[in-house]
Image (tube, grey):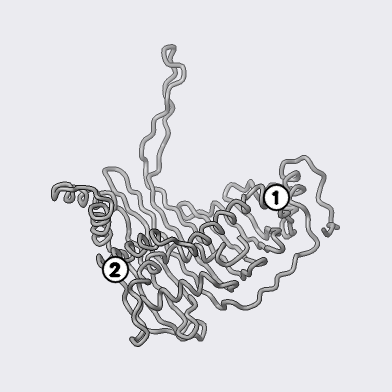
Amino acid sequence: MHTLRQWGNRVICAVMVGSLLLGGTAMAAPVKPATPLDNLQKMVEVMTDATSAEYRWDIHVNSRSPRYQYIPGKVTKANPYPLATQKVVGTKVGKVDVSLEGRQGEEQGEMHIIANVKIDNKTTLSVDADVRLVDKAIYFKLNKVSGLDGSMEENEALTKYLGRWIYVSPDMVKEEIGTDRFENQLNLLQTKKKELNEDQQKVLNRFKELIVRHKVFTIRTLRSEKVNGVDTFHYSITLNKRGLANAIVEYATKDEGKVMTPAEIKKFHANFDKHTKSLVLPTIEVWIGKNDFTLRKMTMKTGFSLKTVGLDWTLNLSTKVVYTSVNKPVLVEAPAPVRTFEEFERALSGTSSEVSDTQETL
């Protein structure tokens, strides 16, 4: 939670894991010009080891889903608790927009959050907040919170805390969020990654080999662009479903020793196509600094679409991350004055006195 690896970049590196796997065995000899695979591998290594960054992350989700009308069951002596039934009466359109902008260092960071949720073009939730992380404690400030039904605006306790910093102690962060367990698991995984034994390394190399040979990912070199004044390598990465299916079959038959007849392989491919038909294959674009190999920008689009008789389910996700600086010192001060999270919690539950104009500083 407290380092770039443990926060933002774990998302980026998860998205880019295919590119990481594509490196390794495919790396060119030093005398040859660097390939897109070389540059992607180098970028993942650089960003994994980064200690700080300044960023902006935009997320957009659009959805269409059936609108249901619930019909209560008829109560009878024989059936006093009948189940309700439902029928489709239309389509519900949803839209979620989230913007995260901030700086993150090893032990401190700050972020501004704006989130809006709309259903059928009507805003159902709107949040504007600031968050700071200092010495493993979290400080947050709700600048604006509103909802369609007006219940949030009418909540006097919440209204009185708008614009006020609220302190969440390190112990509460660990207890409520479980960051200590998360960090321990992450550190364990990172240690294991560094201490791969010979057999584990062989398995990893085998996966790389399968991914490269079956062209599970397609990488295209696009026109070079400047991002915030930095010259970049520009690549697009797409997933090849057929290549992924072929890689799975080869691993199952040659590495796991599973015997599959041609008919069984054909059936596997048919089922694979059936279960992935509704997926919109992710398309990723990355912009990598030519001199320092830092990730300067990344976009991704994906989703799914499922349409059957009377039903229309679709979800489209697009996201964009822009890094304006990497590995530069980040200094964030604890805000003052503050109220404790326990006070905030009691105020919302109606068990505390009103918030005074003069707040205490911890």
Q: Position of residue 214 (x, y in %)?
A: 25, 65
Crowd tier of the residue under label 1, counting other residues whose Cα lies within 10 Å: few below 14, some 14–19, many 20 or above: some
Identify the residue at horizontal 55%, vertical 54% (top origin): 185
- Figure quadrant of the N terminus: bottom right
Instruction: Say the numbered circle drawn on residue 172.
Output: 1
Q: Position of residue 90 (x, y in %)?
A: 37, 44
Identify the residue at horizontal 63%, vertical 66% (top origin): 111
Identify the residue at horizontal 65%, vertical 77% (top origin): 329
Count of marks, rendered view: 2
Quadrant position of residue 200: bottom left
State how far apart marks 1 and 2 are (Cα): 46 Å
Query: Which amino acid type is marked by label 1?
Result: Met
Left or right: where does residue 192 sit relative to residue 269? right
Q: Which residue is mark 2?
A: 212
Sequence-first tag of 1 and 2: 1
Query: Which amino acid type is marked by label 2?
Result: Val
- Figure quadrant of the C terminus: bottom right
Secondary structure under the numbered disc 2 in the rendered image: helix
Q: Position of residue 57 (x, y in %)?
A: 52, 67
Instruction: From the viewer's side, name the closer residue of 285 and 327.
Output: 327
In this view, the residue farthest toward the left is 262
Left or right: where does residue 80 sit relative to residue 176? left
Identify the residue at horizontal 48%, vertical 86% (top origin): 291
In this view, the residue farthest toward the top is 77
Mark 1 against mark 2, which lies toward the viewer? 2
Instruction: From the viewer's side, name the closer residue of 186 and 307.
Output: 186
